Image (cartoon, rainbow, N blue to C red):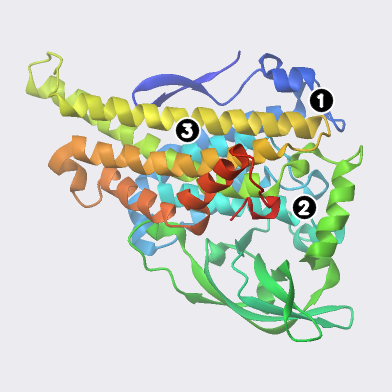
């Protein structure tokens, strides 16, 4: 294995470049399209380069964390650096200049970014997955978005608070949406909306892809945590959206046929719910990792200064709290990584994704959010008065993980109950797996 060592919670761990010949999913599964030998596909080499670049950016992103919170937005230079690193191309279609990277590599990069600045990791995660969703639409939609600028960024707001009515050649869209992350940096947006039928009643839940010229932004993000996420409220007034930029029931039927085809890209066979929900947990686990790393490094320095170079043994609570929290974080990362590997194994083999795996991914995702909160709560107690000082990475992570956990997709009861119903043999509507 070719690897780069990182220091996570004080323990050297292998992250970044991985010799994919050691990953059985790549060694055994057929590649759905060309672009590299089975044991070292091109997308993995590119992902390794992205991870290396992201790792090099961490010190400056960490230094900008206070500024990011104060400005309530990710600095332009940070966004530009992530574009240059190829991060936002990881889920973009190859035909539009993307690298179509493995989700495991993408979410590793997200966790790294969040370990330095949770707000940056949160925005990077959500802007990074939106190209994956756009790629599910007709190719013309992708060409609309990236035809003139392959680095154009796309944000989203999926709550169905818009109204879409049929019009000649497409639809007309109106509505208001809340909290589109990083919207000021984006040229396009994906908006959740209800399609209205002839009777005036909703007939379908859809997503519409809309250019920056067709919507206005309003500051609406003034929250206790993830302050730098730069969420903007969005207003659309009766704009035309062509049919190829709408993704509703017809689009889902078309996609299901395309995904089963032999030439389909494996990445886009992975269920939307699995990608989108993981994107809302990975930054929180990264935030917890960063807080633990900061605390342990500080305490090691402090113990040497306070005890003449002798190792401080610690009281009864703090070491146990750190061990418990670190174990919770590790458990969730292992579960999420396992699920992502299995999802890609099925996708690479062009197999239907089992409902059990989809539900398990959802179960482990909400549990990962819950564990991130529990771990940072333990750390805050272990850190004592220092941990609650303003602008301390621990108190920042504490605010950020609690804020991220409030997202509807991180509702633990919903995610757990779906898996529990399936485990008991009760009926589960798989269209609700994201809810």
Q: Secondary structure at mark 2?
A: loop
**Gap between marks 1 and 3 measured at Cα:** 31 Å
The quadrant of the image that shows the C terminus is bottom right
Circle nearer the viewer, 2 or 3:
3
In the visual, does 58 lie left or right of 167? left
Q: Position of residue 148 (x, y in %)?
A: 78, 61
Provide the secondary structure element on which disc 3 rests.
Answer: helix
**Which residue lies most toward the front here?**
425
Residue 384 visible within the image: yes
Q: Residues within 10 Å of mark 3 (few under 14, many from 20)?
A: many
Camera-near label (1 vs 2) is 2
Q: Earlier in the sequence, mark 2 or mark 3?
A: 2
- Asked whether disc 2 touches disc 3, contact meaning CB atoms under 8 Å apart, the reply is no
Q: Mark 2 sits on what residue? A: 135
* In the depicted structure, whether residue 207 falls above or below residue 295: below
Residue highlighted by disc 1 = 36
Residue 332 — which label? 3
Which residue is found at the position 53% from the left and 47% from the top? 417
- Image coordinates of residue 17 in percent, x first then y, are 60, 23
Q: Is residue 143 visible?
A: no
Residue appearing at x 81%, y 57% in the figure: 252
């Amino acid at each position: 294995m070719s690897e780069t060592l990182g220091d996570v919670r004080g323990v050297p761990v292998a992250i970044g470049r991985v010799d994919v010949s050691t990953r059985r999913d790549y060694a055994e599964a057929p590649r759905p399209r060309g672009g590299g030998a089975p044991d070292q596909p091109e997308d993995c080499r590119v992902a390794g380069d992205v991870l290396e670049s992201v790792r090099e950016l961490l010190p400056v992103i960490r230094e900008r964390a206070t500024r990011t919170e104060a400005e309530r937005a990710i600095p332009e230079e940070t966004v530009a650096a992530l574009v240059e690193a190829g991060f936002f191309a990881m889920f973009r279609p190859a035909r539009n200049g993307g690298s179509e990277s493995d989700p495991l590599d993408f979410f590793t990069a997200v966790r790294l970014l969040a370990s330095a600045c949770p707000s940056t990791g949160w925005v990077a995660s959500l802007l990074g997955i939106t190209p994956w969703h756009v790629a599910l639409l007709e190719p013309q939609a992708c060409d609309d978005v990236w035809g003139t600028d392959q680095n154009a960024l796309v944000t989203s707001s999926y709550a169905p608070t818009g109204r879409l009515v049929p019009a000649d050649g497409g639809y007309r869209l109106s509505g208001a949406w809340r909290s589109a992350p990083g919207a000021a940096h984006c040229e396009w947006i994906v908006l959740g909306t209800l399609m209205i039928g002839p009777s005036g009643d909703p007939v379908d839940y859809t997503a519409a892809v809309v250019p920056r010229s067709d919507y206005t932004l309003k500051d609406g993000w003034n929250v206790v945590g993830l302050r730098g996420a730069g969420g903007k409220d969005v207003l659309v007034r009766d704009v035309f959206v062509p049919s190829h930029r709408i993704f509703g029931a017809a689009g889902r039927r078309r996609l299901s046929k395309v995904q089963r085809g032999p030439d389909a890209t494996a990445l886009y066979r992975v269920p939307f719910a699995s990608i989108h929900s993981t994107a809302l947990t990975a930054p929180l686990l990264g935030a917890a990792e960063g807080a633990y790393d900061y605390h342990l490094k500080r305490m090691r320095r402090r113990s040497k200064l306070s005890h003449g170079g002798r190792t401080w043994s610690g009281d009864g609570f703090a070491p146990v709290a750190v061990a418990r929290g670190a174990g919770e974080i590790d458990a969730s990362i292992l579960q999420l990584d396992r699920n992502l590997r299995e999802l890609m194994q099925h996708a690479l083999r062009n197999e239907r994704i089992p409902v059990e795996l989809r539900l398990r991914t959802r179960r482990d995702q909400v549990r990962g959010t819950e564990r991130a909160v529990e771990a940072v709560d333990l750390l805050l107690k272990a850190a004592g008065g220092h941990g609650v000082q303003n602008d301390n990475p621990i108190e920042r992570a504490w605010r950020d993980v609690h804020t991220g956990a409030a997202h509807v997709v991180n509702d633990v009861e919903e995610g757990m109950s779906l898996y529990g119903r399936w485990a008991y043999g009760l009926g589960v509507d798989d269209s609700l797996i994201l809810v």
